[in-house]
Image (tube, rainbow, N blue to C red):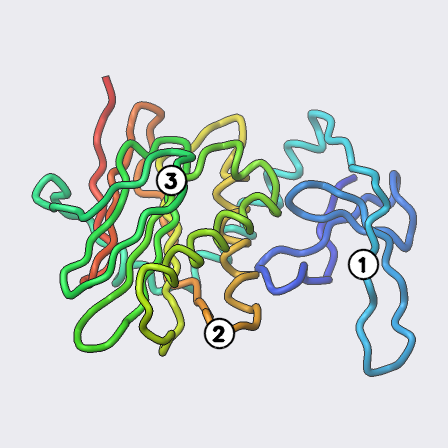
Amino acid sequence: MLQETNHRFATTSWMWLTDPDEIENDELIQPFDCEIFRMVPARTAQANPTAVPTGDEYQLDDDDQARFDAIHRPALARAVATLPHDGRIAAGNTALLHPDAEAGMETGPTAAVGATALVGTSGVSTCVAVLARAPVGGGRWRVACSHLSANQMSSLQGARDAVDQLLTSLAAVSRDPWNAPAELYVVGGCEDEDVAYEEFGRVVAAAQLRAAGPGPDQALLAGARVPACAGEQYVDVYIGTDGVTYSVHRGN
């Protein structure tokens, strides 16, 4: 039976998975894409074991999928529970906002810089918006937004690539030095029963991994939320100098 281990997956809130009846004792299952890795023991007491891909994937049957969902939801809740989202992602009247640019689905990030810079996206239903901002100095902010499709979130690596691309666009919008970590926000539209927040979870995990990474353009995961809850609802969301503002709407 599919189950969690006590081994944390990298720097995320998720644990490696296992199935003692289906995989070898020295193998673990990646908790997002179900890839199977072989754990190679460390050569010294100071080193960590190495995860080596086997090229195989754990196949989920109906019972496994139900168990996977039961494992995944609490892990995502753990990731979100520690974030200061209540104070940084706020409901508002987005119709009154005048963004400098809007991101379309799969069109790549859009970014702006200034004392009143504002960017965002509309129509976020079962997809996910990733937003970022970083202070520039003199009361100015860099801001950026991407509207991710299911295809961009179909794997953990795809989600990581999307987060990296967003931060690259954020850095490129201004020549000013990077003097503070960028704040990352993940906002989903509404639940898709077929994926049970798996895609949203991949993006949150990708942001956690990016926040733990080295480099001059450092980031931190500052908030995550799924404001809508019904299949016919969608979210418009924007990021600016005051933080993240969203509104929930009902489709036709």
State the residue at coordinates (66%, 32%): 65
Q: Secondary structure at mark 2?
A: loop
Q: Mark 1 and mark 2 in contact (Cβ < 8 Å)?
A: no
**Left/right of residue 26 with respect to residue 77 in the rendered view:** right
Residue count near mark 2 (Cα–Cα under 10 Å), binned few <14, some 14–19, many ≥20:
few
Q: Secondary structure at mark 3?
A: strand
Amino acid under label 1?
Ala
Quickly name the residue at label 1: 51
Could you say which is closer to the camera, residue 246 or residue 213?
213
Q: Mark 3 and mark 2 in contact (Cβ < 8 Å)?
A: no
Number of the label disc, if any, that sits on residue 216? 2
Dot in front, 2 or 1: 2
Going from N to C along the chain, the mark reached first, 2 or 1, is 1
Q: CA distance from mark 2 to mark 3?
A: 25 Å
Number of the label disc, if any, that sits on residue 182? none
Amino acid under label 3?
His
Q: Position of residue 170 (x, y in %)?
A: 36, 59
| Above/below status of 61 relative to 174 | above
State the residue at coordinates (53%, 26%): 194
State the residue at coordinates (72%, 41%): 34
Residue count near mark 1 (Cα–Cα under 10 Å), binned few <14, some 14–19, many ≥20:
some
Quickly name the residue at label 3: 147
